[in-house]
Amino acid sequence: MTFKPAAIAGLIAIFAPASVSAFVQTMTCDASGQYQCGPGETPKPVRWADRCVHYYVNEAHTADISDDSRTIAAVQRSFTTWNEVEGTEFLIEYAGLTNEDRAEHVDARGPEGNANVVVWRDTDWPYASRTAFAITSVTFDPGTGLIADADIELNSESHRFTTGSEGVIVDVSNTITHEVGHFLGLDHTAIKEATMYGSAPEGETEKRSLHPDDVAGLMATYPAVGIVPACPDVPDYFEQPQGVEKKGCCATATSPAPSGGAFLLLLAVFGILHRRRDR
């Protein structure tokens, strides 16, 4: 089985108001646009096969927030917001801390070869866009759309992150709640009030809670099937596997999608919304 890694986040853009719009699922390919489906290829929604998925938080946290417990609590609230949606049977559970800092699918032997991580980049932000608040990388099988790994990186080198309701700059929960939508397989909606709208200004906190459009997207991706999610036991600390060779290659978003077992890295950002203001 081959996997396609895709970095998914919000485009810095101004979307025109739409009278009729709805949630958007991330698809394995497009009917038209950047990643067109090949001959006979049918687009499939990108989603997790399991109904319970774990994530870890990198132990380095960020220097922006002096109390690491507040940082972890804000991250957990962001994931829990999606867990609280009624009418779907899907859980994302916090597993603990990790020293893993690679935002990629780690191909290693054994069940502990890979972890879904949330990591801050206080230095060495690896992407071209400095205005990006965060990038979510999702690795999936292009044949089935099934996700193998999802990782969230936060750009704390270029932006200052905060928690709480006083002196908000780039709110952790506002940012990560949006990124969790990508973690689950949702793309951007044109509804400005929705969590999955593609941009945000500094100081915003509205994306901490979900809009009905976000809820509809989650329910469509993970409909209730009458099965209580089974959450396997995982280590409460994930040790980064050593000696794992990174495989595959990466291409920018302007390159055509490769075929076969090649990897493709799509880069987009969730960051500052630039608006023209009348004086």
Image: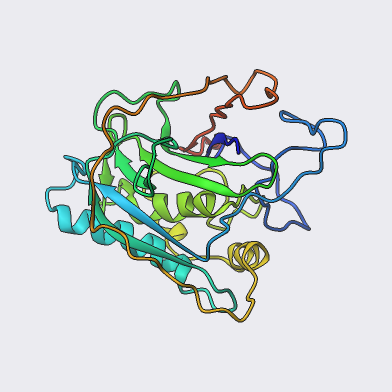
Check the picture and name the quadrant holding the N terminus: top right
| Residue 147: % across, % down | 55, 48
Q: Residue placed at 23% from the left, 44% from the top?
A: 239
204 over 9 or under it: above or below: below
Q: Position of residue 78 (x, y in %)?
A: 38, 60
Q: Is residue 63 left or right of residue 109?
A: left
Residue found at the far left of this picture: 66
Q: Is residue 233 left or right of residue 227?
A: left
Q: Is residue 16 above or below residue 159?
A: below
| Residue 276 visible in the displayed image | no
Residue closer to the observer: 151 or 270: 151
- Farthest right residue in view: 40
> Going 43% across and 35% down the picture, which residue do you hit?
107
**Figure colour scheme:** rainbow
Percent x, y of residue 16: 70, 44
Q: Residue at x 87, y 37 (%)?
A: 40
Res. 174 in view: yes
Q: In this rendering, would 212 be left or right of 160?
A: right
Q: Measured from the top left, where is residue 225 in percent x and y?
A: 64, 76
Residue at the spot 61% in from the left edge and 24% down from the top edge: 262
The quadrant holding residue 105 is top left
Q: Is residue 73 above or below residue 111?
A: below
Q: Quadrant of residue 119?
A: top left
Residue at the bottom extreme, as displayed: 226
Q: How many marks?
A: 0
